[in-house]
Image (tube, helix red, strand yellow):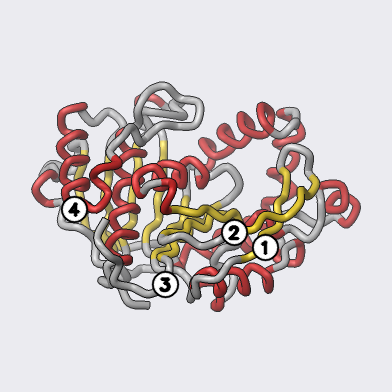
Amino acid sequence: MPERRVDHPVILGIVGDSAAGKTTLTSGIAAILGKDRVVTICTDDYHKYDRKQRAELGITALHPDCNYVDIMEQHLRLLRQGQPILKPIYNHKTGTFDPPEYIEPKPYIIVEGLLGYHTRKMRECYDVKVYLEPDENLRIKWKIHRDTTKRGYTPEQVLKQIEERRADTEAYIKPQRTFADIVVSFYPPEEHAEETGAHLNVRHILRPTLPHPDLTPILDVDPNGHIYLRLARDVDGKPVDILEIRGDIPEAKARRVEELLWSLIPEASYLRQNVGRYEEGREISHPLALTQLLLAYHMVKAAQGIYAI
């Protein structure tokens, strides 16, 4: 890759509710940019209390008072300055804390978690900010699957936790959406409501806070096509572009879109490989792959000094 034009690591934020797909999105972006050039940070590691203590205190992991927000701010600032941190580690399987990890910044940093945009000081550290907002029923399915197969919960415990967290989701997680440059929403197609993986549709709300790539060469004119862009108004009434990519996009068309995006980030082209894989899926999701490529594009452009914050 050519010499970078900015004097600090480029930081991408990915914020969303529990099991919104943050880790899956992150892993693909890291693969595109080169894992030797990317460090990933999870803000969930900054919990104050372990699982048992949270239950005793009656507080959820989503509440700011349950997290060392001030240390998150400090560590983000240090990483942006190119300095190392001693990052805590929360073990989601055991619900306790492991020994901290010494982290040195790399050219690209991806910070994913629940409360990444909670304060102004944190928000000021990012070059690109993404909010994940999947269909709620889909998120619940993802959460049940993840927490029962990897974190030792029963389905009933997961559903109970979702209800216990609902108020904090509304109060602290969803309000962070307003600070994102891009809002990404995966959702099942109407004709396949049970879809949870490779054939999901995706909607990108592209706000004018970033210069987005010109995709007109590969867009469909018909709004019922496989990939199209339309002007709309977001929930706050502000104008945005909405990029829709259907899960049933034909292989040949998906490859053309991917080729266009790869051509816009030639610095990473030598790392072409299979992106778009859900963690346990064998099939490639083109909507996921294209989302990962689009976000990698923004990180590369930020590294070239095109974005100023």
Separation of marks 2 and 3 at Cα, in angstroms: 15 Å
| Residue positioned 66% across, 27% down in the render | 149
The first of marks 4 and 3 along the sequence is 3
Q: Upstream in the sequence, badge 2 or badge 3? A: 3
Q: Residue 283, position in %: x, y?
A: 37, 23
Q: Name the residue at 30% across, 67% down.
A: 4
The first of marks 2 and 1 along the sequence is 1
Provide the secondary structure element on which disc 1 rests.
strand
Residue bearing the label numbered 4: 264
Between 235 and 67, which is closer to the camera in this rendering?
Answer: 67
State yes or no: discs 1 and 4 in contact (Cβ < 8 Å).
no
Question: Pointers 2 and 1 in contact (CB under 8 A)?
Answer: yes
Residue 306 at what x, y percent from top left? Answer: 25, 71
How crowded is the residue under tag 3: few (<14 C-alpha within 10 Å), some, or many (20+)? some
Circles 4, 3 touching at the beta carbon (< 8 Å) = no
What residue sits right under mark 3 in the picture? 8
Q: Residue 103 shows which numbered tag?
A: 2
In the image shown, does 156 or 283 lie closer to the viewer?
A: 283
Q: Earlier in the sequence, mark 4 or mark 2?
A: 2
Amino acid type indicated by mark 1: Leu
- Judge from the rendering whether residue 50 lies leftward or rightward of residue 267; answer left or right: right
Q: Is residue 56 above or below residue 256?
A: below
Identify the element where label 3 is drawn.
loop
Which badge, 1 or 4, comes first in the chain's sequence?
1
Alpha carbon of mark 4 to alpha carbon of mark 3: how far? 22 Å
| Image side of residue 91 versus residue 43, left or right | right
Residue 86's tag is: 1
Residue nearest the viewer, comparing 214 with 264: 264
Residue 239 seen from this side = no
Q: Is residue 304 visible?
A: yes
Mark 1, Cα crowd under 10 Å, few <14 / some 14-19 / many 20+, is: few
